[in-house]
Every structure is written in C-alpha cells, then in structure tokens.
Amino acid sequence: MWPPEADEILRGDHALAFAYQTPARGVVLNPLTNLGLWDREAGTGEPVSSSVGLWRKLERIRANPRVALAYHAREHGSSERPEYVLVQGEATLSPFEERDWLERHLEAWERIAGPRDMAPLWERWLSAYHWRTGISVDVRRVTVWPDRECRGRPQVHGEPWPAEPPAPQRPPRGGTGPRIVHGRAARRAQRRPHVLLGWVGADGFPVAVSVRVAGAEPDGIRLQAADGLVPPGGRRAGLLAHSFARYAIGQHQYRHTGWLESGDDGILYAPHTSSGYWLPASMPLYRLAAGAVTRSGVRSARRAGFLPG
C-alpha cells in the first residue's frame, strides 16, 4: 500500500507520535516506542502497544478508533531517510485478558525497549507495565512529505485527502485563551528537538504535523509551519514537544491540549492543559517510574470498572 521508502521508516524509527481523539474532537499526541510490526501488502500492522494501566487513553481509542501515527524522528533508529510519514487508520486493541502479549512480541520489544532479562524483584515491580495491549491499525492513508518539516508536495497512498479543509469548530464555553502559563510552555517547547501539532481532519482522522515554536504572545504561543499545512479557522488541537534517548529510558516531553487559530496573521496556539515529565537516561529510574505509574493506573482502572477487579 505504501512505497518501500516509507516502509523503511515505519519499521526503522525508534519512536513515533501517536494521535488519538478527545470526546470534544480535540487531539492528544503521545510519543510511543515503535515496534515496526507492519504488513505493507495488507495495509495493516501492530506498530505500538500500551500498558493497560494507561487506561484513559485506551478508553478514548475504544470510543473513537480513528488514530494517526507520525514518523518524525530518526534518532537511534535504523533509517536515515529524510521524509516525514503520517499514517492514518482505525485502531483495534488486543484483548486485555491475554497477559502474554509481551512474550509473543519479545523480539520486537527488546529491539526498541532494551533487554527484558531482569531480576525477579524488577519483574514483579513492572508486572503492570508489562501487562500490555497491542494497538493494531487498519491503514486508510499514508502521506509522505519530502522532509521532516512537512515541506514540499506530499505523496499520498491509499484514500485521497478530502477536497476541502476541515470546518472551524465552535469555541469552547470557557473561552479560547490560554489557561496555563503559556510563556513557560513556549520556552520549554523551544528547547525540544521535536514539536508536533495535531487536530481532527475533515474526514474525522487526526492529523499531526511538524511545527516550530516562534515564541509567546499575550494570546498564546506563536507557531510556524510549512505554507498551507495548517487549516484556516479555529479548532481544538494538541501540541507535543519531546526528546528521547536510546531505549526511550531518557525522556523529556510536554503535552498540551488547547485552541488553535490559523489565518492570514499566522498560527496561534492557546494551551488549556499541560502534562509531561523528564526522566534521565537511567534504566533503574525509568523502571521505578514506569512501575509506579502503571501500578497506580491499574488500580484506578479497576475502580472505574475498565478492568476486572
């Protein structure tokens, strides 16, 4: 379905940005490790997974399976190709009852996340982290830009893009302006090598593209993007700024949801929420944090009835 050049990127990148939708038709962008499990001829794959402890993300994917995966970073991967690849399709989650997902995909997992072999104490601590669901994607469209800034004329494989851009959305009741200290958010994002912006396209699939942060203004964060890339008007959107080390043990990421305005005077993003964290490139610290977050998430999922008690 997609050319060999794109397949090299889909299989070789170390990390990608995964875009899913909020109930209000906004977009959340999450960096995930890339397993590279694709079937080019069938147009399907199981490229990423998630701990079941991160259940709110999984709940939203179940409610609206239209997702996107942005291949935008070559660090620590096996490809040095210059293109930016956006995959859009419908996601399916593997059954939570199958606790052996990681064992069945161990080779792909260790290639990206590092050796699984560890002491029994670590294995017990990471039991929730290792309880994973695979996220399969039935691909509808693969778009390939010539470079990772999304400049130039893209090549589209699969369903064509809608003829018209998405219509502007109704502003939120709480107003469109920033709801966090956006000047600090802009400075943090400027220090990260990868910044992506996401919104819902005219056909209901998320779109995620590369942007640059130009600075902060009273009404929001000023962004720069390739000409014609961001649709005109106002809409809910997500912003991700991140970096990562080999095996993703060193991570630095900031995620926002907010309001996007695009027009003749440029692109302005007003962040409404903020989340993120920094982890040094230390395997013990990464394991401590991953175990704590996912164990807490599993308990929360069970209290909410998302997972059986």
Image: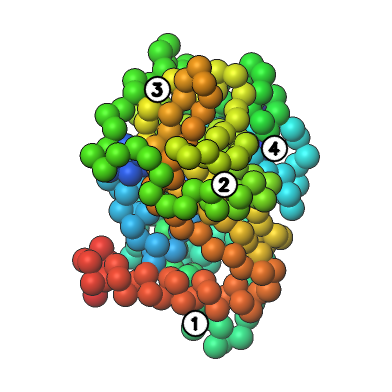
Q: Mark 2 packing: few (<14 Cα in 10 Å), some, or many (20+)?
A: many
- 5, above or below 164, in the image: below
Q: Is residue 181 visible?
A: yes
Q: Position of residue 99 (x, y in %)?
A: 41, 68
Q: Earlier in the sequence, mark 4 or mark 3?
A: 4
Of badges 4 and 3, the one in the foreground is 3
Q: Position of residue 102 (x, y in %)?
A: 51, 64
Of badges 4 and 1, the one in the foreground is 1
Q: Which residue is mark 4?
A: 8
Q: Which residue is mark 3?
A: 233
- 107, above or below 12, in the image: below
Of badges 4 and 2, the one in the foreground is 2
CA–CA distance between discs 4 and 1? 35 Å
Query: Which secondary structure lies at badge 3?
Result: strand
Q: Earlier in the sequence, mark 4 or mark 2?
A: 4
Of badges 1 and 2, the one in the foreground is 2
Q: Which residue is mark 2?
A: 186
As rendered, which of 94 and 216 lies closer to the eye? Answer: 216
Give the residue type that dot 2 points to.
Answer: Ala
Q: Earlier in the sequence, mark 4 or mark 1?
A: 4
Q: Which residue is mark 1?
A: 125
